[in-house]
Image: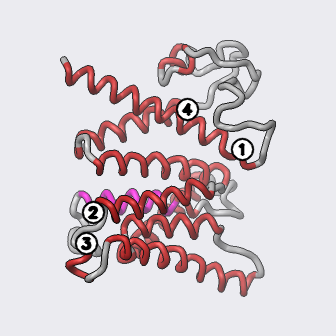
Amino acid sequence: MIEGIFLLLLSLIFLSIGSLSSVLIYRLPMMEMKINGINLFFPRSHCPECKKDISLFFLMPLIGFLVQRGRCKKCKKPISKLYFFNEIIHLFTGLALFYYFGISIFFFVTYLLFFIFYILFILDYKLFYLPLYLNLSVVVVGFFANSAFNLYTKNISEIFGITSFMYSLIGFFIGYLSLWIVNFFFKIMHKKDGIGGGDFILFGGIGTIVGPLALAPVLFIGSLSAILIISTQPKKFKREIPLGSGLILGLFIFISLIYFELFENILVI
């Protein structure tokens, strides 16, 4: 009985966080462009079509969407299914992490990183936009996770004789500089940037998490993932590539392979 109530409360939390991710995905680009003075708290949630405020009942995760049958109660225009999927994805991801790792520091930090990466993935896929503060939060969380708790690097000091913080720092600089150097030579040849500055920071942030030795396979898998993403909408991605989304997907795939020990003897400390 108690376990059931706990899982229900946990599920509601994950659904609410998924709903928060929808708010950030919708509002962050508008905040960047300073549209109508919008921020995370003002104006209150409203239908983007008719601009009418949404009642608290219809703001309830999942329930609001299902009760309205995917349409605004007032103007009957369709509600983006992204809101529904955001909540479902966060629910299942949160429950999966809880099942495997329980209530632990690894669970909390990993779910936080998933939350940040998910928003970055969607924004880059939709708008080629990687908010600076979210990118930097990946760097901060990566340093914190490995320096304070050694969550994603193991036995670094024993093998290399350096601290986990230094290992993450090296990962950041190699991740950042590797893409910066590629873009530097591209710009010399083509007189324009080939890789966005947000991708430099993002890959550096990934380096703080997995360390420098894992960056090559993450970049390889991420590049293949970016090609896969392009194939979903070739016309949209004819001129620009959501490399950030590819790198994030590559990181998730790489970590999954590591966890299930398919790369057990490769680059894993």
Give the Cα separation between the discs numbered 3 and 2. Answer: 11 Å
Nearer mark to the viewer, of 1 and 4: 1
Residue at (51% x, 20% y) in the render: 60
Give the Cα separation between the discs numbered 4 and 3. Answer: 38 Å
Query: Is the Cβ of the residue at disc 1 closer than 8 Å to that at disc 4?
Result: no
Give the Cα separation between the discs numbered 2 and 1. Answer: 37 Å
Neighbourhood count class around disc 2 (C-alpha, 10 Å): few under 14, some 14–19, many 20 upward: some
Q: Mark 4 points at which residue?
A: 83
Q: What element carries label 3?
A: loop
Q: Earlier in the sequence, mark 3 or mark 2?
A: 2
Give the Cα separation between the discs numbered 2 and 4. Answer: 31 Å
Q: Mark 3 points at which residue?
A: 269
- Measured as percent of width and height from the top left, residue 224 is found at 48, 66
Residue at (48% x, 65% y) in the render: 205
Residue type at numbered disc 2 = Ile
Residue type at numbered disc 3 = Ile
Magenta run includes residue 253: yes
Question: Which label belongs to residue 258?
Answer: 2
Give the Cα separation between the discs numbered 1 and 4. Answer: 19 Å
Q: Name the residue under label 1.
A: 31
